[in-house]
Amino acid sequence: MQQQEGLARYREIIPDWDEFLAACARPLPLAIRVNTLRSRTQDVRERLTRKGFSLTAIPWGDDLFYIETPGVSKTIEHWLGMFYIQEAVQTLPVRVLDPQSGDTILDMAAAPGGKCTHIAACMKNRGPLIANEPVGKRQPSLMANINRLGVLNATVTSYRGESFPMHTSFDRVLLDAPCSAEGTLRKESSLRDGATASTIARLSRLQRRLIVRAYDLLKSGGTLVYSTCTFAPEENEGTVSHLLAERDALLEQVSLPFDATSGVTTWEGEEYAPEVSRCARIYPHHIDSGGGFIARIRKPA
């Protein structure tokens, strides 16, 4: 089977391999995140239920639902910004970042806006939020979602992340890095053969530049969350290990509300910093969603 061949390089690091393959072959369930800037979770649930949608609460997220009935994107509730259609796994980086009202926060690669608008909701629209997106064709979707979801505290910028100006320092930075996106294979069938080695190598070089700049933009005591939606250790633990070699960064334990897999410390003969075991790997069979990787990094005070 092509899928097995394409992802076989990860077999040694993915527990429950057969469960992983089975989850990858199933259709991705539709999930929504209630936008607390526009509505309350119970109100959204009641309104959509009255319209005939079948909602199932996601137990580890009090603002998350799976929806089995099609057509929710065509509802007035969606157009009013009462919820955002988002893979459940994609809400985790913001939960790990733990934004607070009054913080100064940078989302370094913000389009199309799922995580940026989630950050704003956690901040209750209080405190400066910089939504940076260097790719011009992705900026309209970012601005549209910021407006639709009622985000009032965000400023959109368009700097290349690796050269983001050092004029301001941030309490928290989210770097949801450009990646080979293998973790989205349940909705992108072209990725079921895995990413090419050249793609992974090219992106990991970019990610290493981005993570160093993201860290340098932190205030003393500040928090950086680095996340991807890919399985490749070169783009995940390899990138974080590079930062630890370049800067005096502290890698914190990622705590999630369900069982995930720890970061890998060796890969294809390369030894990573032992601290990367504190990172988290999320696979499709863990929470019936996509795949991802999260690291939480602190700058010493």
Image: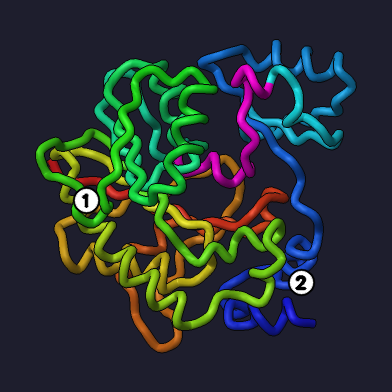
Q: Give SS at disc 2.
A: helix
Q: Give SS at disc 1.
A: helix
In front of the other: label 1 or label 2? 1
**Residue displayed at 33% across by 74% down:** 272
Q: Nearer the viewer, residue 241 or 162?
A: 162
Q: Where 261 falls versus 69 (above or below)? A: below
Note whether residue 159 is visible: yes
**Residue displayed at 15% across by 37% down:** 169
**Residue displayed at 57% across by 40% down:** 257
For residue 69, the mark is none
Q: Residue furthest bottom?
A: 269
Magenta-drawn segment: 78-94
Percent x, y of residue 88 = 63, 42
Q: Amino acid at mark 2?
A: Asp
Note whether residue 118 is visible: no
Left or right: 44 as drawn, with respect to 194: right
Percent x, y of residue 80 = 62, 17
Q: Which residue is mark 2?
A: 18
Left or right: 240 as drawn, with respect to 16: left
Q: Amino acid at mark 1?
A: Tyr
Cα distance, mark 1 to mark 2?
A: 37 Å
Is residue 179 rendered magenta in the image? no
Q: Which residue is mark 1?
A: 215
**Residue displayed at 63% across by 35% down:** 60
